[in-house]
Image (cartoon, rainbow, N blue to C red):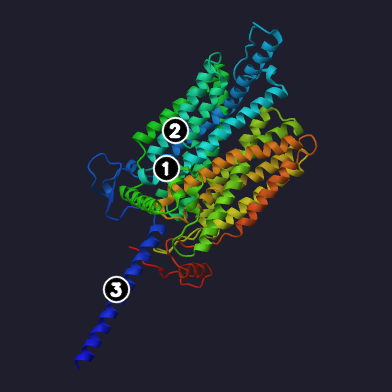
Amino acid sequence: MDHQAEGSEGRLLRRSQDEEGHRRRDSEDVDAVESQSKPLLTPVETHTTIDSYDGPSEELPKDSIKWWKRPSILILLPPFLLYATALGAAAVPRVNLVLTLVCQDYLNRKEREVTHGDFTPIKLVLGADNPECEIPEVGAHAATFTLYMNIITGILSAIISPRLGQYSDRIGRRKLLILGSFGACLCEITLILCLKFSDQISYWWLLLASAFEGLVGAFTLILALVHSYASDCTTFEKRSSAFSLFHGCLFLGIAIGPAIGGFAIEKTDDIAVVFYGVVVVHVIFMSYILFVLPESLSKAKMKLAEEKFAEEMRKSSDSASWLSNFRVLNVFEPLNVLWPTEGGNLTKLRTNMIMLAAIDFIMFGVGFGSITVILLYSKIEFHWTTKFASYYTSFVNASRVVGLFVILPLLTRFFRKKPQPGAPVGGCDHLDTLIIRGALTTEVLGTSFFFIARDTPLFMAGGLIASLGGLGSPTIQSSLTKHSPSDKTGQLLGVIALLHSLARVIGPTAFNGIYSETAKTYPQAVFIVLVALFMVAWLGAWFITPYVAVDGVGDEAVERLFSEERGELDESEPLVGRN
């Protein structure tokens, strides 16, 4: 009897331990699900911690939190629009300034060679349309020098951006936004010095301006940090809409900025006024971030990211490989974030992340690299004036703004099913994949119009159709954040900034080279290459699997989501209870 009693007690003890283990695993699964399905900064129902609060760190009632103390994309959108407008305003004057400075140096050298001694320098109007500079030799020198500037900025940004993006997960977004704007401000100040003291300061100092911009990650990092901030403040189902608002502000600024810059130059007859204005905008932007914008990451999340980073460093230092000591020199080492080693569905998860990053790289590289080619082609083939080309640029960017501000939010509102409370959210959904494939389809179609167009209306129609491809980039980047833990958002988007920096170098170099080699024989060849690249990206989009779960959410949850979409589940039945 005693042995039977002991056996019965042992079975009861083991059963109790098994039940406790199941409860613990279920709790961990729910925590993993909630970490990806809840807003990254959703306050608890009763209390929340305000990290930007100047007083002691304490739990404050939600009702006592002022709206300007709560992180929100609506607080960041106005200064970002101002920042983007300043970039657009300075774009054309910067090109003209570089061209004039290179031209001035070229003419001075030619004059010295002719006189073999003292000479009177030719004084050009810096930034203006100087007929003396409209010669192939000056154009070639200016194009080469601009390429040097892009290479310096791109390479430095590729090295720095992912490190700073990862660092933002540990110290917050605000400090690095200020740093990025400060580096860009130094770049503009260097441009002003070269403009005002062109006789004493060589235009080669503009390479230093490019270095200032690259050392803080350039605009690609600013955009990545803005997206990181949006990721911290939004739920998964609203993230693509949030990203589209920032992309819309970017294109809106690029569209209206040149008009504002041109008006300022016309009224003052001084190109320097634009760069003065850009410096003022940087000061306003940094002041706003410092004194107004609340931090989007809580101290708890920053501490968690710091602990995970320290653990990774400890494991790396324990490695026997001597190569581990040189990790910091490896530019591509941060790309490991696209190749996760933990969690469920690793094969599909890795495939999705690689495909999304590759598609984004192609779209950004083609978009950035083809701008100059499109404008040169239209000027030579259709004899567009500078004014008409500006109208075309504004027309295309305005259509992108409509797509990002109107079409994408409407698609999200009416066609994205709101998840049930507690539903496991993993990866992108069907709407994300449809938008990405549709955007690439419009890019292929619009670029095909460029190839076949022999008159201005058809060419402009191609630009209008291709502009709808702008819906793809914010959707891709928001989808990527859905495949990664929240404590790695900054690192992930820093890697995207790295890829954008590389595309910023590779795209213009490749497409300008192709066009220069084929301009006399078959100028449409470059558009064939563009169509081919978009077709590759379009095919890659079909390898993206919706609902690839993150943080251990298994295949059963994915199948459950598919079943719900097919109508096999009761809509009223909660999938997973959430507190």
Quick check: 214 above or below 552?
above
Q: Earlier in the sequence, mark 3 or mark 2?
A: 3
Look at the picture and state if 176 lies above or below 186: below
Q: Residue at x 49, y 61 (%)?
A: 417
Spot occupied by residue 99 in the image (x, y as percentages of width and height): 63, 23
Q: Badge 2: few (under 14), some or many (20 or more) residues near its Cα, within 10 Å?
A: many
Sort mark 3 into few (<14), some (14-19) or many (20+) by Cα contacts within 10 Å: few
Mark linked to residue 277: none
* Label drawn at residue 20: 3
Q: Nearer the viewer, residue 1 or 228?
A: 1
Which quadrant of the figure contains the C terminus? bottom left
> Can residue 547 be seen from the camera position used here?
no
- Going by the numbered disc 2, the residue's amino acid type is Ser
Amino acid at pointer 3: Glu
Between the residue at mark 3 and the residue at mark 1, the CA separation in whole angstroms equals 45 Å
Of badges 1 and 2, the one in the foreground is 2
Q: Considering only order in the chain, which callout, 1 or 3, is on the residue closer to the N terminus?
A: 3
Q: Which mark is residue 181?
A: 2
Lateral position of residue 15 relative to residue 85, left or right:
left
Residue denoted by label 1: 74
Point out residue 86 in the picture as x, y percentages from the top left corner: 51, 30
Viewer-closest of 447 and 162: 162
Q: Earlier in the sequence, mark 1 or mark 2?
A: 1
